[in-house]
Image (spheres, rainbow, N blue to C red):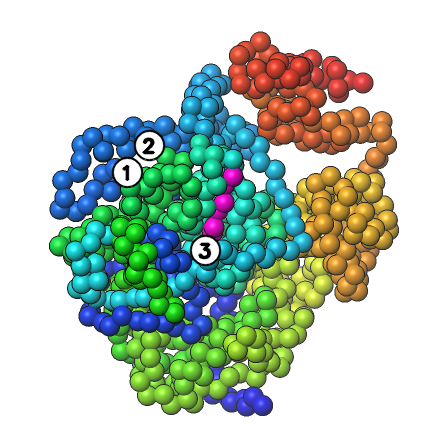
Amino acid sequence: MQECSAAVRIRLTGMQAATQKRLTAGKVQTVLAKQSSAVPTGVPPTAAQMVPTGVPLTAAQMVPTGVPPTAARMVPIGMVPDPDRQEHRKNDMNDTDRMKELVSKLNEAAKAYYAEDREIMSNLEYDRLYDELVALEEKTGVVLAASPTQSVGYEAVDELPKERHESPMLSLGKTKSREELADWLGDQKGLLSWKLDGLTIVLTYRDGKLFKAVTRGNGEIGEVITPNAKTFVNVPLQIPYQGELILRGEAVITYADFEKINGEIEDVDARYKNPRNLCSGSVRQLNSQITAQRKVHFFAFALVRAEGVDFKNSREEQFIFLQKQGFETVEYKAVTADTMQEAVAWFEEKITDYPVPSDGLVLLLDDIAYGESLGRTAKFPRNAIAFKWADEQAETTLREVEWSASRTGLINPVAIFDPVELEGTTVSRASVHNVSIVKELKLGIGDRITVYKANMIIPQIAENLTKSGTLEIPCTCPVCQGETRIVKENDTETLVCPNPDCDAKKIKSFTLFVSRDAMNIDGLSEATLEKFLAEGFLHTYADLFHLDRHRDAIMQMDGFGEKSYQNLEASVEKARHTNLARLIYSLGIPNIGIANARMICREYKNDLDKMLAAPTEELAAMDGVGPVIAGAFVDFFAQEKNKTALELLLKEVELEQETFSEEALPLSGQSFVITGSLNHFENRSALKEKIEALGGKVTGSVTGKTICLINNDSTSNSAKNKKARELGIAVLTEEEFMKQYLEK
């Protein structure tokens, strides 16, 4: 039984805390330590710990996004490079580097043109670069996943299939000693590289095409994520080598993309804890479209099989081969025992502003045969070893523990302690993660603790020196004051609030409800909604249409006066006039975006009863829906509380009357492509909206399904015009399109 204490201090902090930023690290003070032989309990093995015997590993490491390892980076420290070899490598990489540059430029231009209604390059320049990319793809046999010459469809599945690996993916032995690294290498040549934190993926290519992608899983069995891998930013879909190629690499998300994605999530508690957590969730999505939006990168670190290729008994030659196939490999330096200290210092200096999380380095023997001859222990291969940075620690006093409520129901403990300096910054807070760790550390207010920054970034408690064990777990939720519950799953205890009506869980849903694509109610930020929930103004979505009941109280709040209240009231009244698609989307059904909501409403001609009665199979058969979205829709409305919420809303809103006859939707089932500037419509978005209102669809590329290409420069030799002519598709000016399709 839990025991409550008045001394327990709890605060609502989860919804107010900012996303944890990456802190700048100072110079690392490394210390001599004996090699570790096991992974800490409860800590998932990293890519550096996952290499099978005889497979080259430089681990879960990567180069900066978009910057492949150049010849200069691969020169052994203290060794004179072979000019001929360097020049050969440079020539080999020029085409691939240029292709990556072209893909980036063309995609940036396309995004500006189609999504943002602005031009950053002329049609002529775009066509020139596009043609250059096509020529390079034909020359090299390499087609990058993000290439605008390709149209990769998204796939959705009900679950990720499991598959056993051909050989187990093992952990690595570790050391914190630079001297031990040099001793381990002996008189051999080694490859020293980053050990970065992502998700290990095994790729298989057959006949030059990506055949299969599988996650590491537990080292024995992984999950098949082939559709998702095809959306990775830099994974080649096609390579020159035609035999069976199996390789391993790390799927990663950069700090910049991590912070950007987190910054777009208004609910603080819904944000991801770290880039690896985000990457893992992104790679293992059931809907590959979501993966594509996350900008996952792949960096190869191990070649498993490539029959018929002579690698001259060198792991580095394997890396060079992979680079020639269009892969980006991890950044590395060739080293000897004599150059080891200089190489480690180089990585150490670079870590302070490296674009992805790193918790160390990996040293791999270059000699393939020698490395394989060493065999392995029960846990580790003997051809590689991991180097861990020695963490700087500081002693301080624990002053309190905040219990932070989240929308998921989890109540997370955060330690507050006297400020200390770590890695060049001041820290005073550290997550304790869950109840199990609280108990393991035997925490109590006033205890002397040591703290450090994991991976030189995230503050953590290393040890409790006094171990009083007096900290009591709160019996009530800090938000709703309802009774809490300790839940045990996989030997880990967490504190949860089981109250389905807890306000902490409501904030995210209310924020979506009032958003622009939903009910579009201005003046209701997440902070304002939090205040209204705390005051008891809101219990259901329908309550938003009766804020007038609390007019006086609202006008007394900070930030509100008569004028701001009147603006809010006007916005609420305006929101009463909406359409069914917006209303469905506003309910927050998992996987249902505004486009999906419109599609379903159109299919059933806004007949709500038919929509709610539709079986999963019927919904899944719709073009663009599929089993995942269909299942989410049916499951949502199978819950009585959700049907009740909809019924209450229907009493408050007036739905627009839409007609769905063939006459009203003359463009139903037809696809169009728009390019160039327009004269009659304000921009391409306006024309797109018009086409969609008439049942049509607008796509970004010309295919066999395109009805016509709309281009006021219909006689140009642009890539789209050429493609249309090749496929026998009409190229119409804006006026011609309007006359033929709109003026009927």
Residue at position x 38%, y 90% from top? 468
618 sits to left or right of 429: right
Write down the quadrant of residue 151 in the picture.
top right
User: Secondary structure under badge 1?
Assistant: loop
Work out whether mark 2 precedes mark 1 in sequence or the reverse, and give the earlier one.
1
> Mark 2 sits on what residue?
93
User: Secondary structure under badge 2?
Assistant: helix
User: Gap in Å between the C-alphas at discs 3 and 2?
Assistant: 26 Å
User: Gap in Å between the C-alphas at discs 2 and 1?
Assistant: 8 Å
Residue at position x 28%, y 64% from top? 388
> Mark 1 sits on what residue?
70
> Mark 3 sits on what residue?
199
Q: What amino acid type is highlighted by mark number 1?
A: Thr
Work out whether mark 3 precedes mark 2 in sequence or the reverse, and give the earlier one.
2
Q: What amino acid type is highlighted by mark number 3?
A: Leu
Disc 2 and disc 1 in contact, CB within 8 angstroms = yes
Q: Please provide percent x and percent y for residue 230.
A: 53, 41
Disc 3 and disc 2 in contact, CB within 8 angstroms = no
Q: What amino acid type is highlighted by mark number 2?
A: Met
Work out whether mark 3 precedes mark 1 in sequence or the reverse, and give the earlier one.
1
Q: Please provide percent x and percent y for residue 710.
A: 64, 19
* Residue 153 image label: none
